[in-house]
């Protein structure tokens, strides 16, 4: 990686500063009240997602949480949690959780950096976009599980393009 295409954390650019620059380039809405955190709002195909990115200096840990509002029927919460468990054991790089009190679906990912702390602008942008893409991929799965008359295993077909059931 060359200095021209890299962000060198701590030496030259703070990781949250780098993400703020990317948000400007991508025309994403953002808010920043803290040096180590930024909140970015990104339009997806299904929803407008909120990505909260935070930098833990002591651990060299960069964390994102991609959220969207979701209000499933109370009687479907157990099915939702079953679906989340199935999604989390599938091939996802992060993990989904549901906050029933806040009515938010959360998709969390982390990057633990070495002492060099190098990442390119492209890699950082792709990482944020990947969080949105993963959330988008499973959005229909959660919808089918909560509002459809399908079992969680069958709802997974929405994410993987498999046909479930019969016509």
Image (cartoon, grey):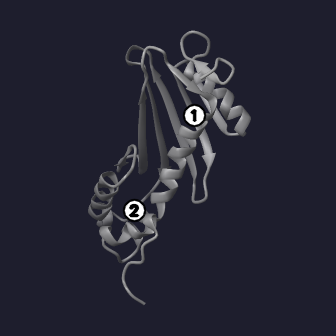
The outermost residue toward the front is 1
Res 150 quadrant in image:
bottom left
Query: Measured along the vertical axis of the image, is residue 167 above or below residue 69?
Result: below
* Disc assigned to residue 8: none
| Screen quadrant of the C terminus | bottom left
The outermost residue toward the bottom is 167
In percent of width and height, residue 112 lies at 40, 26
In percent of width and height, residue 156 lies at 37, 66
Q: Secondary structure at mark 2?
A: loop
The residue singled out by tag 1 in the image is 123
Q: Are marks 2 and 1 in contact (CB under 8 Å)?
A: no
Res 47 quadrant in image:
bottom right
* Disc assigned to residue 72: 2
Q: Residue sitting at 52 percent across and 56 percent down?
A: 136
Query: Measured along the vertical axis of the image, is residue 21 above or below residue 156?
Result: above
Query: Measured along the vertical axis of the image, is residue 149 above or below residue 79?
Result: below
Q: Secondary structure at mark 1?
A: helix
In percent of width and height, residue 106 lies at 42, 46
| C-alpha span from label 2 to label 1 | 34 Å
């Amino acid at each position: 990686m060359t200095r021209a295409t890299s962000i060198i954390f701590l030496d030259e650019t703070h990781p949250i500063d780098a993400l703020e620059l990317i948000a400007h380039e991508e025309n994403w809405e953002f808010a920043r009240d803290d040096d180590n955190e930024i909140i970015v709002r990104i339009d997806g195909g299904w929803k407008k997602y909120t990505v909260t990115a935070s930098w833990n200096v002591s651990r060299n840990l960069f964390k994102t949480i991609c959220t969207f509002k979701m209000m499933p029927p109370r009687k479907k919460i157990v099915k939702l949690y079953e679906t989340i468990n199935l999604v989390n054991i599938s091939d996802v790089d992060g993990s989904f959780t549901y906050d029933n009190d806040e009515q938010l679906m959360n998709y969390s990912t982390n990057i633990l950096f070495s002492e060099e702390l190098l990442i390119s602008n492209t890699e950082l942008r792709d990482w944020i976009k990947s969080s949105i893409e993963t959330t988008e991929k499973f959005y229909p799965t959660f919808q089918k599980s909560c509002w459809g008359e399908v079992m969680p295993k069958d709802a997974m077909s929405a994410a993987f393009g498999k046909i479930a059931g019969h016509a």
